[in-house]
Image: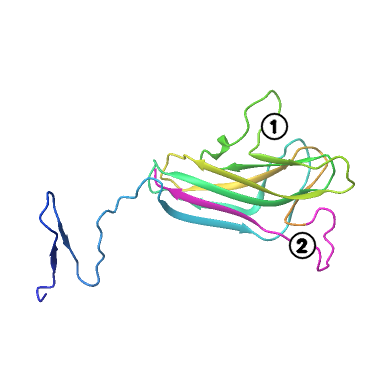
Amino acid sequence: DTSGELTISAPAVAGTNTLTLPASTGTVLTDTAPKAGNVLQVVQSTFTGTQTISASGFMNWTDISSLSVTITPSSSSNKILLIAQVSCAVLTIDRIVALRFTGGNSGNFVGDAASSRARAGTFFTTPTGTSYGINTSLMMNYLDSPSTTSAITYKIQAAPNYSSGNVAINYNAGSDADTAYIPRAACSLIVMEVAG
């Protein structure tokens, strides 16, 4: 059309049935409002190095290196989906490593209060019948409701449960010898804004 605009009319039915196309440099938008459940943004942090978290008391929480993600929700009604994977080990038998989220309202993702018991998002216990530490991969998933449009920084923390039994992140608890059959691992934290 020489006027720079072309109008396509739908069959005559009730309601408005005209779609107006902008110039070739424009964008056709019919509904800009996100639908509930739509993923609006995704941010990821990874940690591929190694870290030793020293056992210096009961449940001494420590940030895991580089597992920190900052996200700014576009609406206070939106949710934030947290997906975490941590490769870890306890270097002493009969010990526990616990994990938890921090940031927003993710601190709510812990077990119920029960007398003096520590509260965590998840944990792993090494068996008593072995003479070496055990490696594992721990997962945590949580849908947070931060109720804000301010920037939020989410992190993952780990804690040994006792004054002995250091926690190894991304390396083998039994032996970290420099050989082809000894692996190194990685951790990740994925954060998604989900329309509310």
Amino acid carrying mark 2 in the image: Pro
* Image quadrant where residue 157 sits: top right
| Quarter of the image where the N terminus is located | bottom left
Q: Which residue is mark 2?
A: 183
Image height of 15 relative to 21, above or below: above
Write the residue at 39% across / 46% down: 195
Q: Is residue 133 above or below residue 183?
A: above
Span of residues in magenta: 172-196
186 drawn magenta: yes
Q: Quadrant of the C terminus?
A: top left
Most common SS among magenta residues: loop
Q: Residue at x 80, y 42 (%)?
A: 126
Residue 136's spot in the image, x, y percent?
Answer: 73, 50
Label 2's element? loop
Mark 2 or 1, which is nearer the eye? 2
Q: Earlier in the sequence, mark 2 or mark 1?
A: 1
Tell me which residue sits at (67%, 61%) in the image.
Answer: 48
Residue 158 falls inside the magenta stretch: no
Q: Is residue 163 left or right of residue 42?
A: right
Q: Nearer the viewer, residue 64 or 84?
A: 84
